[in-house]
Amino acid sequence: MSLEQKVADLEKRLASLEKNQAKDQVALVIFSEELDRAVAAFIIATGAAAMGQKVTMFFTFWGLNILRKQKLYAGKDWMSRMMTMMAPSGASHLSLSHMNFWGIGTKMMMMKMKEKKVATLSDLIKTAQDLGVNLIACEMTRDLMNIQDEELIDQVGSGGVGSFLGEALQSRLTLFF
């Protein structure tokens, strides 16, 4: 192979690497409805967005309950109604992952957050939306749990795992909560 061919081959490989290089973006998977995990996810998301990063948050399984604004029962089968009844109705009704103690731990944590001027989860969600964080509800989970558009907060998109993986594969950082 001549020197010119080797240089051309290296230039081609370099162009391919540059094309597939991770971008300044962050991908988060939220599969838990626990308050402390949700707050951590939104603090990281808003921090990254404030630093100019593109941020995508993919909510699946129980994590989708964070994005609820109301519970709807009409038009659902009995199992979907039961799942809706047992699920929290959004960001202000989540419990802690540890030391919850039938809700007392959650109330104590909320008091401590207020005392320390830590933003509430609802405030963090609003900030994330204002910063352009892309909130994606998992289509499969929505179908499985029969979660309708009217049950979710505004500015939530819908997508499958393929759309999330497309974002994650281009991200410098992917985290799970």
Image: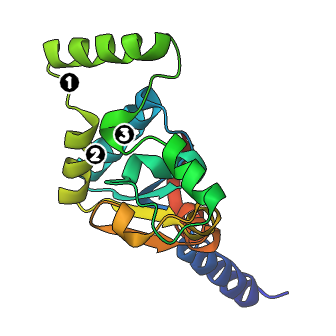
Amino acid type, mark 3: Ile
Q: Are marks 3 and 2 in contact (CB under 8 Å)?
A: yes
Label 3's element? helix
Residue 88 in the figure: left or right of residue 15: left
For label 3, the residue is: 44
Q: Are marks 1 and 2 in contact (CB under 8 Å)?
A: no
For label 1, the residue is: 118
97 and 164: which is toward the camera:
97
Tag of residue 46: 2
**Label 2: few (<14), some (14–19) or many (≥20) C-alpha neighbours in 10 Å:** many
Image coordinates of residue 53 in percent, x first then y, are: 33, 56
Label 1's element? loop
Amino acid type, mark 2: Thr
Q: Which of disc 1 and disc 3 is earlier in sequence?
A: 3
Which residue is found at the position 56% from the left and 46% from the top? 62
**Residue at mark 3 to residue at mark 2: CA–CA distance:** 6 Å
Position of residue 156 relative to residue 61, above or below, is below
